Amino acid sequence: MFYRLAGIRHTRYAADRQLWPVPVDRAQIAALTAFAAAAPLLLSNLYLGSYLLPWIIWSTAALGLNLLMGWAGQIHLGYAAVMAIGAYSTIHIVRAGLPFELAIIGGGLLSAVIGLVFGFAALRVKGLYLAISTLAMQYLVDWIVSHVQAISGGSQATLQAPAFRVLGLPVAGDMMRYYVALAVCLVVTSFLLNVGRTSFGRALAAVREKDFAAAIVGVDPFYFKLLAFWCSSFVGGIAGAVLAFCYYRAVTPEQFNLDVSIQAVAMVIVGGLGSVIGSYLGAALVLLAPIMLNNLVAALARAGALPMSEEVLSHIPLILYGGLIVGFLLFEPLGLAKVYDNLRNYFLVWPFRHARR
Amino acid sequence: MINDDDRPQTSGDRGVAAPPSLECRDVARSFGGLKALKDISLVLESGSIFGLVGPNGSGKTTLVNAITGFYPPQQGRILYRGRDITGTRPHRVAPLGIARTFQNLALFRGMSVLDNILIGRHIHMRSSALATLFYWWWAERDEIRQRRRVEEVIDFLQLEDVRDEPIDVVPLGLQKRVELARALAAEPQLLILDEPMAGMNQEEKEYMARFILDTRDEHGTTVLLIEHHMDVVASICDRMAVLSYGELIAEGEPGTVLADERVVAAYLGKARRRAA
């Protein structure tokens, strides 16, 4: 329909390699970016602060995890721990008086270094064993964060994010915090988009698919696995810092526990491994589905359609949510990105059923 | 196409000055009690096509794995252009100018044909996360330059039609060709082909034989060819060797080697004598 490929003939490699070769895709992206930039003017504070803001921050985090899981094919069940390291260290660095821009880089670097240590496990073990050793990282970091006074201020303590400035402007109010999160999200997104078309991304995919074949073309599987852990942890640390400064505005150890790690993995799997748009869709579904299911169940209960006790009602959304994930793994293992792709492919040739081949 | 008379001279001219492209000296490798390779010594002259044949399980692939570092030899040495490369890890073998294909295809699923060939250029590229982050400033120009080289390989192997297809949907014969393209994209000086014509029909075999000859003639690439199709080996190889149970039982010009009694026995058993 709109996505016509007919008549689009690229004559230069640069044109063939661009991120969105189809003009209508470029128009869509431009419209989305414009909407994202104008969102504070268009949306109420409730929607901006409680829906859009967490969505873009979690999309940033999911993109980082997707680099590791989707591109490099290494599972990570301790991603929330990585985010916690980024959040806590950025807060401590800002408190020490350094500017936020440097602090967030420092937080990312610290996450990357500690994440890398656990990446070494990936050199020895694969699959389930790697899952367990990253799980160990989650528990280890959880324990250290909550028990070391100097980091968290004690197991029950909440650490307030200090006031901060970005590029000389004080960041206060939902609008400024949203723009900071958006800027980080855009940088990470453009990085991940480019991973899909550079030799770095190809090397990661090669290691994921067949490491011996990767080695024979000169890709060092060990080095690229570690590099994937490094980059993914760096992005995770930065996402954690943004989450702490722009959304929660305070950190407690519970914000980064195992549940959160599982949630991040769910975002990547439901969204689609190795897909940028999938990370956005996955984050949206995982964040919004519980809210919408809650509202739905509450509405049905009010209407008298669900004659059950409060106790049972409160669990129904969780059950549905779990069913949703299982359903995705069963029926669309490539996630929401694949659903979107199928839809797009359908309209590419509509009203016909097949393309020329 | 160079005619048959010119061929020995091509290798001869190079042989005088340059050391042999590949030399195996008493290479031995065993797995537990199984002696997969017993004191194999071979010399591949630069710019020649060298055939390596033998019944299944005779150690051909093990020899290739020893050369490319997957199973380093336990004894003996492997010299590449006069330089000792014994035990060099696989990912360090590629930058030396050695490329190989695999018997059972080792392409990267989930990637397009083009990406599969592009990764063959890996050793000529700088693959860093920072270059990816600053793509428009640090990576784009190089990516396009590499793409141009890859298009030459695509043109050479006539893969234009399937360039943008995902590798999974490409038929087997073409997948073999894509794997050859990936190896050629690295611009190797030594190309190791492990049964590139397995499962191919006569027409596809002829195409592949032509590609191998053209590669050697255009780039002076040395080719180590493992193949079961004797007609192909006999017609395109300058020299050949036969392995049987890990032992080198014959080496020389295809005509003489294929007439060797021990070679015939290794392939056909003793039945021939009983029949005679």
Image (tube, coloured by chain):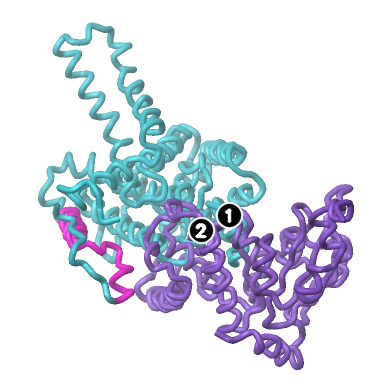
Seen from the viewer's position, the closer of residues A52 and B252 is B252
Label 2 to label 1, Cα distance in Å?
8 Å
User: What residue does disc 2 label?
Assistant: B173
Can marks 2 and 1 be said to lie on one chain?
A: yes
Residue lying at 30% horizontally and 22% vertically, measured from the top left:
A317
Please provide the residue range marked out in magenta: A12-36
Question: Dividing the image into 4 quarters, which one contains the C terminus of chain B?
Answer: bottom right
Chain ID for purple: B
**Residue B170 in sight in this render:** yes
Q: Are marks 2 and 1 in contact (CB under 8 Å)?
A: yes
Magenta includes B234? no
User: Of the residues shown, which amino acid type is indicated by label 2?
Assistant: Gly
User: What residue does disc 1 label?
Assistant: B199
Mark 2 and mark 1 lie on one chain; the one further toward the N terminus is 2
Chain ID for cyan: A
Question: Chain ID for label 1?
Answer: B
Residue lying at 41% horizontally and 77% vertically, measured from the top left:
B148
User: Of the residues shown, which amino acid type is indicated by label 1?
Assistant: Gly
Seen from the viewer's position, the closer of residues A346 and A177 is A346
Residue lying at 21% horizontally and 48% vertically, measured from the top left:
A174
- Work out which residue is located at the far front of the displayed protein and give it: B276
**Label 2 neighbourhood size at 10 Å, few (<14), some (14-19), many (20+)?**
some
